[in-house]
Amino acid sequence: MKVNFFDVNICFGKSRKGIYKPADSVSELLSKLNSAGIEKALVWHISQYENSPVKENAVLSQMISPYPGLLGTWVILPPQTKELPVQKEFFSRMKKDRIFALRAFPDFHRFLLNRVTFGKFLEEIEERRIPLLLSMDIMGAGISWQTVYDILEEFPRLVLILCDLPVWGSDRYFRPLIEKYPNFYLETSFLLQSGVLESFVRDYGAGKLLFGSGFPYRDFGGPMLYLLHADISNEDKIAIAGSNLSRIISEVKL
């Protein structure tokens, strides 16, 4: 069985806080992906988080442009501050730069992720089916479950991919969201508890799960091994490993 891995959750670059064995450059990242057997990745750069997305979104675009196996993720800020391009220009630049997803770090970047702040902007993201990735744990910080619930209640058709779940089981939090919102997905790097993939696929199918390593905060091997040896069908493994994400990317309208 050939399983093609398309990683939804990879960060690279040298952090100011220090990370154990990161990929400081694109060439280092490509080497690590090749060693792990990961064909494609949706990536972002740590400086988009630690510094300013205003500058670093463009830097990411430039860094990945020669490499078709790397798709980019931009980080968003409130439109009211006019730090990022206005909407029409923003989306045309995304298309030009091969950017297929967005991220938000509201606490670290000091804003509220809600309709008051992002109303028209998130409405267009929703309409264009552009995935919004949120991390529950990034360097000890991250999004709260309450924020996830609130943003989906306000934008129920939003393509939202929740990454870096807590290490302890979170079924009681995410199962209600899976059942209610058709475009809500889970990244798998911390879905490692015994039987968690099997029970999820049994109850909901494999379509809402996306393989992610969480690199460099986690290694590639654990999530890959867990998926490959899960007691689910080969078809489901292939879907989770990459087909689901490929479908989501193909539906983005830029």
Image (cartoon, helix red, strand yellow):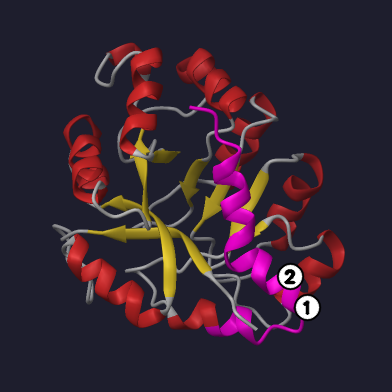
Return the residue nearer the eye: 248 or 15: 248
Q: Are marks 2 and 1 in contact (CB under 8 Å)?
A: yes
Which residue type does callout 2 highlight? Asp
Q: Quadrant of residue 181?
A: top right
Q: Secondary structure at mark 2?
A: helix
Position of residue 65 measured from the top left corner of the image (x, y, whole percent): 25, 46
Is 27 within the magenta? no
Which residue is found at the position 39% from the left and 80% from the top? 36
Q: Which residue is mark 1?
A: 233
Position of residue 221 measured from the top left corner of the image (x, y, whole percent): 45, 83
Position of residue 163 measured from the top left corner of the image (x, y, whole percent): 51, 55
Describe residue 96's horizontal placement relative to residue 23 as left or right: right
The disc placed on residue 124 is none
Q: Secondary structure at mark 1?
A: loop
C-alpha distance separating marks 2 and 1:
5 Å
Which residue type does callout 1 highlight? Ser
Is 250 within the magenta? yes
Say whether residue 52 is visible: no
Q: Which residue is mark 2?
A: 236
Return the residue nearer the eye: 125 or 107: 125
Return the residue nearer the eye: 56 or 64: 64
Within-10-Å neighbours for mark 2: few <14, some 14–19, many 20+: some
Which residue is found at the position 52% from the left and 77% from the top? 223
Decide: is 84 above or below 143: above
Position of residue 5 measured from the top left corner of the image (x, y, whole percent): 51, 69
Decide: is 106 above or below 232: above
Highlighted range, magenta = 225-254
Which residue is found at the position 32% from the left and 69% from the top? 216
Q: Quadrant of residue 76?
A: top left
Q: Quadrant of residue 96?
A: top left
Which residue is found at the position 19% from the left and 49% from the top? 63
